[in-house]
Image (cartoon, rainbow, N blue to C red):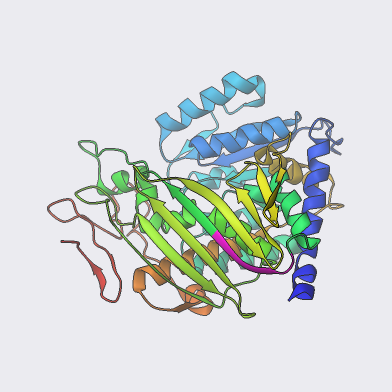
């Protein structure tokens, strides 16, 4: 097992070296071959995370500017863009180039931008990645990148085309670019905790946000506004958030793909009308071809203890990596060695890596599709296992096709509808869909 672990960590080491170099370069940007050294950004999805990603990119390189944007809700988008402009001035140069609507993203892809940031809810990510590659754009894709196996397959095919075209693709699994996480992985690779035996991802927190229903809203408007609470858009909390812990755990396994998974979950406190159709607790066991197991635990229940860590258990010790950019630790013989967070945020580094690769004109290339589809696929696999109560294989996950709305408009019929009491059907393991009593 040890040799296998070392070989599989080679690509992780290469990524760590690239990200370290990007950290050093954050205050000394390379010269772009273009006439004015300026790269143009376009964004699709102007929510908090989306405009946050724009801010990260603008921080990463002073010769980058935002020139076009798309969203489905104009008021929110303009407010977020105005806040960005207040912070970055003329480097946010959208003006009349904000497009609204379900097909507004096409305006961004048709423009002359160098890089597109895709930060909508994950349901829309596969098709947008595919079309962005076809439009010859370099891409930043926020995590997760799909809600079903069909989406994973679409991205895998698009990523291969991106490689052939030399288009760079960076995913938003930010721990891969966080200094403390990279340092821990380097030490794990060097054998600090011995052979990696098991890993566990814990993501325990309070309730998911829920926006109240507004009089006059269509059902599609309500669900899009509350997308995190609907399976067809988000594919569960394990996909939207716990994916960070899953990703670190899979990283420690050399990005191995699980052969299958089983799990359990349910709604312990999420009851009553307008609470969506997702669980508030989930536990999943992933099995791998070499006999190892990975455990994932998600919970969104207020009043309980919180934790957001990944624990990697080895034959000589363990490593614990906190969520995002927290301090990480390695434990050997009961003694803790702390690895502090880096001086440059991983949120900035991931954009610096992408921007530098674009500026290099092909001398440097980055494509995160392999691990971002592997980690997203694992999250989808876990959700399927918990929802069905069955053992689900990786191949079954890849063959899955999720539900879709009747069309893409505010008057469309979503895949799930409330009953007269405002309740949505949820997954009942072993039975299909139904209502809780």
Residue at 19% across / 63% down in the picture?
435
Residue at 84% across / 31% down in the picture?
28
The reply to whether the magenta stretch includes residue 131 is no
The quadrant the N terminus occupies is: bottom right
Residue found farthest to the left: 420
Percent of width and height locating residue 132: 61, 53
**Residue 78 vertical position relative to residue 189 in the rendered view, above or below:** above
The majority secondary structure of the magenta stretch comes to strand
**Residue 417 sits in which quadrant?**
bottom left
Residue 341 in view in this figure: yes
**Residue 201 sits in which quadrant?**
bottom right
Is 121 in front, or is 68? 121
Which residues are the magenta region?
Answer: 194-200
The reply to whether the magenta stretch includes residue 197 is yes
Percent of width and height locating residue 225: 35, 42
Is 294 in front, or is 371? 294
Percent of width and height locating residue 216: 21, 38
117 left or right, relative to 136: left
Residue 137 in view in this figure: no
19 left or right, relative to 208: right
Residue at 52% across / 79% down in the picture?
395
The quadrant the C terminus occupies is: bottom left
**Residue 343 sits in which quadrant?**
top right
**Residue 434 vertical position relative to residue 100 in the rendered view, above or below:** below
Percent of width and height locating residue 238: 46, 57
Residue at 80% across / 70% down in the picture?
7
Q: How many numbered callouts?
A: 0
Is 136 in front, or is 211? 211
406 left or right, relative to 78: left
């Amino acid at each position: 097992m040890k040799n296998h672990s070392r070989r599989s960590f080679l690509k992780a080491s290469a990524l760590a070296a690239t990200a370290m170099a990007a950290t050093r370069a954050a205050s000394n940007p390379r010269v772009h071959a273009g006439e004015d050294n300026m790269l143009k950004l376009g964004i699709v999805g102007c929510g908090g995370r989306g405009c946050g990603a724009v801010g990260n990119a603008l921080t990463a390189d002073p010769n980058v500017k935002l020139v076009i944007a798309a969203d489905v809700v104009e008021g929110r988008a303009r407010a977020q863009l105005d806040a960005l402009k207040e912070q970055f001035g003329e480097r946010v140069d959208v003006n009349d180039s904000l497009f609204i609507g379900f097909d507004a993203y096409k305006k961004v892809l048709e423009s002359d931008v160098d890089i597109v940031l895709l930060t909508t809810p994950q349901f829309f990510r596969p098709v947008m990645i595919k079309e962005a590659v076809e439009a010859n754009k370099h891409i930043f894709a926020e995590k997760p990148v799909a809600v079903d196996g069909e989406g994973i397959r679409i991205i895998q095919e698009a990523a291969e085309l991106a490689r052939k075209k030399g288009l760079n693709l960076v995913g938003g699994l930010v721990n891969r670019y966080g200094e403390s996480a990279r340092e821990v992985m380097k030490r794990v690779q060097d054998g600090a905790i011995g052979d990696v035996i098991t890993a566990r991802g814990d993501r325990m927190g309070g309730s998911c946000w829920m926006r109240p229903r507004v009089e006059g809203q269509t059902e599609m408007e309500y669900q899009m506004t509350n997308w995190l609470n609907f399976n067809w858009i988000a594919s569960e909390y394990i996909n939207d958030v716990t994916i960070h812990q899953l990703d670190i755990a899979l990283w420690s396994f050399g990005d191995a793909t699980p052969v299958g998974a089983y799990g359990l979950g349910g709604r312990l406190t999420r009851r009553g009308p307008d609470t969506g159709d997702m669980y508030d607790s989930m536990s999943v066991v992933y099995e791998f071809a070499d006999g190892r197991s990975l455990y994932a635990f998600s919970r969104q229940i207020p009043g309980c203890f919180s934790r957001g860590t990944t624990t990697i258990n080895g034959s000589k010790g363990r490593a614990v990596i906190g969520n995002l950019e927290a301090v990480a630790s390695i434990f050997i013989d009961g003694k803790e060695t702390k690895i502090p967070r880096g001086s440059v945020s991983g949120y900035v580094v991931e954009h610096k890596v992408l921007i530098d690769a674009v500026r290099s004109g092909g001398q440097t290339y980055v494509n995160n599709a392999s691990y971002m589809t592997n980690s997203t696929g694992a999250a989808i696999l876990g959700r399927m296992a918990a929802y069905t109560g069955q053992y689900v294989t990786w191949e079954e996950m890849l063959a899955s096709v999720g539900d879709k709305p009747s069309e893409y408009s505010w008057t469309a019929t979503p895949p799930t509808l409330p009953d007269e009491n405002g309740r949505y059907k949820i997954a009942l393991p072993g039975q299909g869909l139904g209502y809780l009593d």
